[in-house]
Image (cartoon, helix red, strand yellow):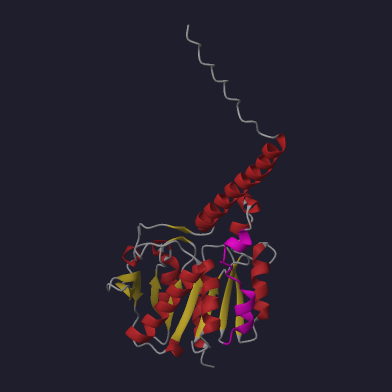
């Protein structure tokens, strides 16, 4: 009778040492946490601009809504020749000065008609435009760098295309646009002057004070600053500063006006009360300041 073959012994399951398992856990858990944190940093870097900038694309009102004659303009062409920036040219007869208007972080040109009318009523030609990412201008996420480039392009359009003497160009900015106008004015001492309507003391705090910013190195991830102190100290052209209400009525305004104290060039500071006559007071003060520019 044939002998049966011995059956193989069942394979023993591999054993994992407790030390190896603990080491793997000690590496995997921090690595996973770091990856999650890195993704959070990436998402914050990509989306934090929305905490400061609030652009809209639909321009619901034009100067025609207030019977103000204007011409649509486009400039700063791409490589294909299409204009990146869209704006309005509002002319007056026999102007002494031309205003380059820089709006704030919210909305688009359609929200600026009152200010544009005030500038026009003061006897200024006006070029107003939307930054990239706003209105009908080329889509891009707004940033301090892009807005500065766009403001430089608008200045170049006035001097190179419309042949306007830089010595007759006055910058005018509102809110965050006033911070931008101050930076541009400090870089261009050849201009006639700069009008700053309610500049912001610490605009980027809207990003840094967000609860999500505490989870990431926000100040390393965000390059925007819109500082007013450094450009104010280096400003060399006359400036007109408007602030709303009174120094004691608005806690943010004294901080913003601290930059005014750093200006060594000729300067004027005015507080506009919140009243139905504020537009008229703005125009009157602006006209007086423009009349004194050449003195």
* Rendered position, 167 above or below 198: below
Determine the residue positioned at 31% across, 66% down: 64
Hey, which quadrant is residue 139 in on the image? bottom left
- Farthest front residue in view: 1
Residue 144 visible in the picture: yes
* Rendered position, 244 above or below 98: above
Determine the residue positioned at 47% across, 9% down: 2
Check if residue 250 falls in the magenta segment. no
Check if residue 228 falls in the magenta segment. yes
**Quarter holding the C terminus?**
bottom right
Q: Percent position (x, y) of residue 76?
A: 35, 75
Determine the residue positioned at 39% across, 70% down: 129
Between 117 and 174, the one nearer to me in the picture: 174
Q: Percent position (x, y) of residue 34?
A: 62, 49
Side of 186 relative to 233 (left or right):
left
* Rendered position, 164 above or below 72: below
Stretch of the chain drawn in magenta: 218-236
Hey, which quadrant is residue 263 in on the image? bottom right
């Amino acid at each position: 009778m044939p002998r049966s073959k011995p059956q193989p012994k069942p394979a023993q399951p591999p054993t994992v040492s407790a030390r190896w398992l603990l080491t793997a856990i000690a590496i995997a858990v921090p690595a996973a946490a770091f990856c999650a944190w890195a993704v959070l940093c990436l998402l914050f870097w990509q989306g934090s601009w929305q905490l400061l900038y609030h652009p809209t694309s639909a321009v619901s009102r034009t100067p025609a809504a207030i019977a103000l004659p204007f011409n649509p303009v486009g400039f700063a062409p791409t490589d294909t020749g299409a204009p990146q920036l869209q704006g309005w040219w509002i002319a007056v007869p026999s102007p002494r000065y031309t205003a380059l208007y820089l709006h704030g972080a919210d909305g688009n040109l359609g929200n600026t008609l009152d200010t544009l009318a005030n500038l026009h009523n003061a006897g200024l030609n006006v070029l107003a435009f939307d930054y990239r990412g706003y209105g009908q201008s080329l889509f891009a996420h707004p940033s301090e760098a892009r807005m500065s480039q766009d403001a430089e392009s608008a200045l170049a359009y006035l001097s190179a295309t419309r042949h306007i003497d830089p010595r007759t160009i006055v910058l005018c900015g509102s809110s965050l646009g006033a911070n931008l106008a101050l930076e541009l004015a400090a870089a261009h001492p050849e201009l006639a002057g700069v009008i700053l309507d309610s500049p912001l003391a610490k605009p980027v705090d809207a990003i840094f004070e967000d609860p999500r910013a505490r989870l990431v190195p926000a100040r390393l991830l965000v390059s925007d600053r819109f500082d007013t102190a450094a450009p104010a100290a280096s400003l060399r052209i006359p400036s007109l500063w408007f602030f709303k209400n009174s120094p004691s009525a608005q806690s943010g305004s004294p901080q913003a006006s601290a930059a005014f104290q750093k200006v060594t060039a000729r300067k004027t500071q005015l507080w506009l009360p919140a009243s139905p006559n504020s537009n008229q007071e703005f125009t009157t003060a602006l006209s007086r300041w423009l009349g004194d520019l050449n003195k």
